[in-house]
Image (cartoon, helix red, strand yellow):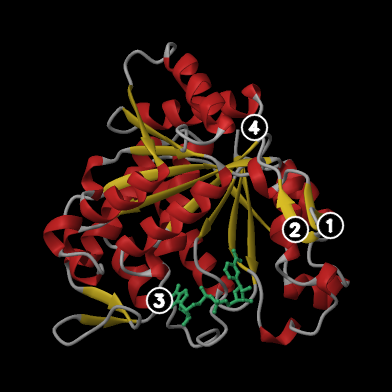
Amino acid sequence: MAKKIVVIPGDGIGKEITDSAVEVLKKVAEKYSLELEYEYKDAGGTAYDKFGTPLPEDTLEACKAADGVLFGAVGGDKWDNVEPSLRPEKAILGLRKGLGLYANLRPVKVADSLTEYSPLKPELVKGVDLVIVRELVGGIYFGDKCESEEFNGTERAWDLENYSVPEVERIAKLAFETARLRRGKVTSVDKANVLATSRLWRRTVAEVAKDYADVELNNLYVDNTAMQLAVRPTQFDVIVTGNLFGDILSDEAAVIGGSIGMMPSASIGECTSLYEPIHGSAPDIAGKGIANPIGTILSAAMLLRYSLQEEAAAKAIEDAVDAALAEGWRTADLWHEGFKKANTEDMTKAVLAHI
Ligand code: NAD
């Protein structure tokens, strides 16, 4: 039976980069005899212009019924003055809530041909291949909060961090399953020397680990993890952590890769999962045909791996991207003298040539 992929190009460079990723999906589907169907839906500013809402009900319903969602990006100056509840970015929050997207997976893999773009020394980033698994719907971002109250004669504010055992179990299982598809190592990150929620987190992850004897588990404090990512990032395979720590560490890890245009992500859902590059809609280059499509192409590979369990096809896309980069193809965001200058279409063709 055909698998249904909802494609949401969104705004700005969204259409250009999702078009590239779909071309790559079509080629890999042909090679691996996969039956994939594509349904295009609106979200973001484009949807607001057409329907007066950034996330039409019809888009959300189609996503719920799909096997996976490929998302471009939303937002742009054009909608700066739209009422806050109707801004394009609200589409992302609506999809997170509507699809129950409880985990964010951000791989950071530095191809040998790209080590020069990292702010870290090439010898430190050579071979980096890690995934951050971040809990997305719990913790301090969603706990009770107080914007302002009087306390002991002064003003204060507070945010409450809380995690339940089932919330931690769910994300820990995902991390162990992810590690099984990779090098079999999970690093659980917390601040158990100070925080009660971290102690429950650590205890619960250790319990879940008993069902995954084939996966190695170690624990690290978040402050140490931040340092280790900068001094020896190759030691990590899968990092699992809560919402707040994950937010910070995943941005730190993303810069190790060197280019925002290259980085994919997956948000794992209770029903459907969503795949998107980590960058935004890049309004400054939209419509010029020069956007780097690789973050979106690699997001499509993640969709094949995590939603359709098509590991060989996913790997074929990743290898084709590596091969195109090794041949010297670079989009404008990465190009310098000595490389082959590619626009979005050239880069897509260079990837397709290796599938
Ligand atoms: P951005 O990621 O869109 O762009 C930052 C810089 O990186 C820009 O100079 C841009 O040209 C460049 N860039 C980004 N992706 C690129 C690519 N694929 N190829 C080449 N260069 C690329 O971030 P921003 O400028 O802060 O935000 C622009 C809009 O995107 C805003 O409306 C913001 O709210 C929105 N946004 C959306 C998402 C999302 O849809 N998930 C994420 C972040 C930002």
Check residue 150 in the rendering and tell me which mark sits there, or answer none: 1
| Helix, strand or loop under label 2 | strand
Of the residues shown, which amino acid type is indicated by label 3?
Answer: Glu
Q: Are marks 4 and 2 in contact (CB under 8 Å)?
A: no
Q: Earlier in the sequence, mark 1 or mark 2?
A: 1
Residue lying at 49% horizontally and 88% vertically, measured from the top left: 288
Cα separation, mark 1 vs mark 3, equals 59 Å
- The reply to whether residue 328 is in sight is yes
Residue lying at 50% horizontally and 36% vertically, measured from the top left: 194
Check residue 96 in the rendering and tell me which mark sits there, or answer none: none
Residue lying at 29% horizontally and 41% vertically, measured from the top left: 236
The residue wearing badge 2 is 156
> Few, some or many C-alpha atoms within 10 Å of disc 4 (few <14, some 14-19, many ≥20)?
some
Whether label 3 lies within 8 Å of ligand 1 gets the answer no
> Few, some or many C-alpha atoms within 10 Å of disc 1 (few <14, some 14-19, many ≥20)?
few
> Few, some or many C-alpha atoms within 10 Å of disc 3 (few <14, some 14-19, many ≥20)?
some
Q: Residue furthest front?
A: 153
> On screen, 288 above or below 239?
below
Cα separation, mark 2 vs mark 3, equals 54 Å
Q: Earlier in the sequence, mark 4 or mark 3?
A: 4
> Few, some or many C-alpha atoms within 10 Å of disc 2 (few <14, some 14-19, many ≥20)?
few
Mark whose residue sits in front, 4 or 1: 1
> On screen, 247 above or below 162?
below
Q: In the image shown, does 341 or 37 lie closer to the viewer?
A: 341
- The reply to whether residue 26 is in sight is no
Cα separation, mark 4 vs mark 2, equals 23 Å
Mark whose residue sits in front, 1 or 3: 1
Check residue 163 in the rendering and tell me which mark sits there, or answer none: 4
Q: Is residue 122 left or right of residue 292?
A: left
The residue wearing badge 3 is 345
Of the residues shown, which amino acid type is indicated by label 2?
Answer: Arg
| Helix, strand or loop under label 1 | strand
